[in-house]
Image (tube, rainbow, N blue to C red):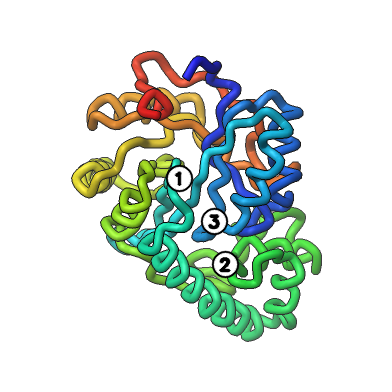
């Protein structure tokens, strides 16, 4: 693929999970900002891909079918991005449906916890920010809490609510790492460990995760992503080389004003990385 790094974004979200732009709006914004290859990777859902694809041809964007699968590994929530998946593959579709059912139950539990903390009407409030009723997530509750004046923005919500030890936190068990990678591979896709710098892991745990990821068939690691610092770009480039993993990059864009990086603003991969798109 003859394309510049800054023209690629392999991690983004639409209103079909917790993004604020409809798939068509996301594709249009990506094109306006110089992106030529875009992966739509909504959480545990692929419903937005068809709408994104309808516009991608008009905007001269290569759309990569993607998804971001929720995983529990050693008691910690991780995310695995699937790239070039077949969204209609029955094994992947069934796995994602199971996760969405878990999300529905967790949303009710979060609302109950917030009720006990004196925050009334949170489930209806969160649903007001949702396009896909199957995917009421923490970000939708966070937007409701901002709307009600409990915090100045979504980032501030996650310092006061919805996290371990704070009101509204509900632990949940997602797919196993091996399951998620298996679903992605069965559908013809490549599994990518998303934003590894966000996970609170000791060095020994990080190495154990990368070992398990590679052993299960993981193909790549996000080296450049919205939540990584320049030092983390270099650090995870070294991990990619050490473990024989390809390097991916994506903004993890959710919407203007909510994301650390906008579409079309990613720096180049560090030297020595083998880009994931070389395998396509």
Task: List x then y, in percent, for residue 95.
Answer: 39, 66
**Disc 3 vs disc 2: which is toward the camera?**
3
The residue at the point 58 percent across, 32 percent down is: 62
- Asked whether the residues under the numbered discs 1 and 3 touch, taking CB atoms below 8 Å apart as contact, a structural biologist would say no
Please identify the quarter of the rendering in which residue 121 is found. bottom right
Residue 46 badge: 3
Residue 198 badge: 1
Cα separation, mark 3 vs mark 2, equals 25 Å
Badge 1: few (under 14), some or many (20 or more) residues near its Cα, within 10 Å? few
Badge 3: few (under 14), some or many (20 or more) residues near its Cα, within 10 Å? many
Report helix, strand or loop for mark 1: helix
Task: List x then y, in percent, for residue 262.
Answer: 67, 34
Cα separation, mark 1 vs mark 2, equals 16 Å
Nearest the viewer among 272 and 168 is 272
Task: List x then y, in percent, for residue 190.
Answer: 36, 41
- What is the quadrant of the C terminus in the image? top left
Q: Is residue 232 visible?
A: no
**Disc 1 vs disc 3: which is toward the camera?**
3
Q: Is residue 219 left or right of residue 66?
A: left
Badge 2: few (under 14), some or many (20 or more) residues near its Cα, within 10 Å? many
Task: List x then y, in percent, for residue 244.
Answer: 24, 29
Nearest the viewer among 108 and 93 is 93
Q: Is residue 37 visible?
A: yes
Q: Is residue 42 left or right of residue 239?
A: right
Report helix, strand or loop for mark 2: loop
The residue at the point 72 percent across, 31 percent down is: 59
Mark 1 or 2 closer to N-term? Answer: 2
Mark 1 or 3 closer to N-term? Answer: 3
Q: Which residue is labeled 2 in the image?
A: 162
- Asked whether the residues under the numbered discs 1 and 2 touch, taking CB atoms below 8 Å apart as contact, a structural biologist would say no
The residue at the point 52 percent across, 76 percent down is: 106
């Amino acid at each position: 693929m003859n394309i510049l790094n800054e023209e690629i974004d392999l991690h983004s979200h639409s209103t079909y999970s917790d993004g604020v732009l409809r798939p068509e709006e996301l594709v249009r914004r990506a094109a306006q900002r110089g992106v030529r290859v875009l992966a739509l990777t909504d959480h545990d859902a692929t419903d937005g891909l068809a709408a994104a694809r309808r516009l991608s041809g008009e905007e001269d964007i290569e759309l990569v079918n993607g998804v971001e699968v929720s995983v529990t590994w050693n008691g910690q929530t991780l995310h695995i991005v699937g790239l070039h998946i077949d969204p209609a593959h029955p094994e992947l579709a069934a796995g994602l449906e199971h996760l969405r059912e878990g999300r529905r139950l967790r949303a009710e539990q979060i609302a109950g916890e917030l009720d006990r903390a004196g925050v009334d009407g949170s489930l209806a409030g969160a649903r007001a920010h949702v396009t896909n009723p199957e995917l009421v997530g923490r970000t939708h509750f966070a937007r409701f809490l901002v709307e009600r004046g409990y915090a100045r923005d979504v980032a501030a919500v996650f310092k006061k609510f919805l996290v371990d030890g704070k009101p509204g936190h509900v632990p949940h068990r997602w797919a196993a790492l091996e399951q998620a990678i298996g679903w992605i591979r069965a559908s013809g896709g490549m599994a990518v460990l998303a934003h590894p710098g966000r996970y609170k892991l000791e060095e020994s745990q990080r190495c154990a995760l990368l070992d398990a990821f590679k052993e299960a068939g993981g193909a790549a690691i996000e080296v450049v992503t919205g939540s990584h610092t320049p030092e983390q770009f270099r650090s995870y480039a070294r991990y990619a080389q050490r473990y024989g993993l390809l390097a991916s990059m994506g903004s993890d864009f959710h919407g203007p004003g909510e994301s650390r990086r906008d579409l079309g603003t990613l720096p180049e991969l560090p030297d020595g990385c083998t880009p994931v798109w070389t395998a396509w």
